[in-house]
């Protein structure tokens, strides 16, 4: 049976590659930036330019489709996920990396229909790595099939998370405490790459065994969720329960055993939801 969304995926891959070319070109010039919700919540003109290009290119092919895109939401558009075919876009995942020329920056494009993710595309453009996955079709990087490490022992695992400035000192304490809890199990170590999309691709490719994060957004996660699960991994809520795309939190892991072990250690803190308006804090 033909995949009704294959054409969409093919178009998305081409657009992601074009977006990556824009990002790489911008990096050859001086990068200026502005702030959004906090002094460390950064946005550049390239974020906005790339997002506009992605959306306009998709609309030329699929006029009736919906969009949830980071900079559009920041400008006041809805982040409610409906049953309509919906593109979930982060034009530059790793804007802080982009500003500092830290070499992990990705274009992330997820696609959902009836609130179910159908495919994910992540282009780590400085590495020239195109990660793709369609539901039930496996996950690939530059055409080579991906497989998670299948590690089931947290004491033999390398774990990824992200940590940055938080205005609430209690939340900062919990973030640091969560890292200490994971290291104290002990795990082999903790890494931070600076982009949720690449973090999930590292889990999918076996380069890391798990990634957890509280406070990210649906556009950070959508594409990576498909890539991890199609590579044989699991995606859970930070409680260990079912993953919710709009919850702003996840554990992506090589196995359910590792994911649930992390869930038993980390302490949750409030981060809001993406399906409530005006909720763009980091």
Image: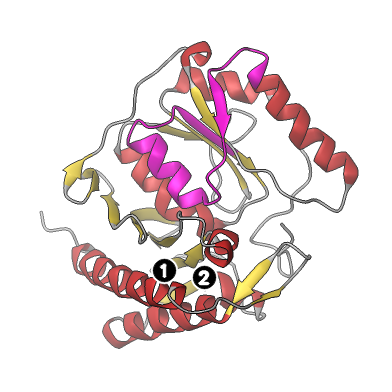
Q: Quadrant of the N terminus?
A: bottom left
Residue displayed at 45% across by 55% down: 103
**Residue 22 versus residue 90 in the image, above or below:** below
First reached walking from the N terminus: tag 2 or tag 1: 2
Location of residue 50 in the rendering, given as x and y in whole percent from the top left corner: 44, 78
Q: Is residue 165 magenta?
A: no
Q: Nearer the viewer, residue 257 or 90?
A: 90
As drawn, is 279 to the left or to the right of 118? right
As drawn, is 51 to the left or to the right of 136? right
Location of residue 242 in the rendering, given as x and y in whole percent from the top left corner: 54, 35
Instruction: Examine the image and state in which quarter residue 273 appears.
Output: bottom right
Residue displayed at 30% across by 87% down: 60
Residue 140 appears anywhere in the view: yes
Residue displayed at 28% across by 53% down: 132
Could you tell me which secondary element the residue under label 1 belongs to?
A: strand
Cβ atoms under marks 2 and 1 closer than 8 Å:
yes
Most extreme residue toward the left is 1
Q: Nearer the viewer, residue 103 or 91?
A: 103
Most extreme residue toward the right is 169
As drawn, is 232 to the left or to the right of 71? left
Residue displayed at 72% across by 72% down: 36
Could you tell me which secondary element the residue under label 2 belongs to?
A: strand
Give the magenta part as a residue range.
183-212
Disc count in the image?
2
Q: Quadrant of the C terminus?
A: bottom right
Residue that carries the numbered disc 1 in the rendered image: 87
Residue that carries the numbered disc 2 in the rendered image: 68
Residue 63 appears anywhere in the view: no
Labelled disc at residue 99: none
């Amino acid at each position: 049976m033909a995949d009704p969304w294959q054409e969409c995926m093919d178009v998305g891959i081409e657009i992601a590659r074009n977006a990556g070319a824009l990002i790489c070109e911008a990096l050859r010039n001086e990068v200026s930036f502005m702030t959004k919700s906090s002094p460390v919540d950064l946005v550049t003109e390239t974020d906005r330019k790339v997002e506009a290009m992605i959306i306009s290119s998709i609309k030329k092919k699929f006029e009736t489709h919906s969009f949830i895109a980071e900079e559009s939401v920041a400008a006041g558009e809805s982040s409610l996920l409906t049953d309509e075919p919906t593109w979930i876009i982060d034009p530059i995942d790793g804007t802080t990396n982009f500003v500092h020329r830290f070499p992990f920056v990705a274009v992330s494009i997820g696609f959902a229909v009836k609130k179910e993710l159908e495919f994910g595309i992540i282009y780590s453009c400085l590495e020239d790595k195109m990660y793709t996955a369609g539901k039930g079709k496996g996950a690939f990087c530059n055409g080579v099939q991906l497989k998670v490490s299948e590690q089931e022992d947290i004491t033999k695992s390398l774990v990824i998370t992200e940590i940055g400035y938080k205005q609430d000192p209690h939340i900062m304490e919990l973030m640091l405490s969560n890292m200490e809890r994971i290291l104290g199990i002990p795990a082999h170590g903790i890494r931070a790459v600076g982009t949720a999309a690449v973090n999930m691709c590292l889990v999918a490719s076996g380069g890391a065994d798990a990634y957890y994060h509280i406070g990210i957004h649906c556009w950070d996660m959508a594409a990576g969720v498909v890539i991890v699960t199609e590579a044989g991994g699991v995606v859970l809520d930070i409680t260990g329960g079912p993953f919710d795309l709009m919850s702003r939190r996840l554990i992506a892991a090589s196995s359910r055993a590792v994911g649930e072990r992390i869930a038993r250690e980390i302490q949750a803190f409030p981060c809001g939801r993406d399906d409530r308006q005006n909720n763009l804090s980091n």
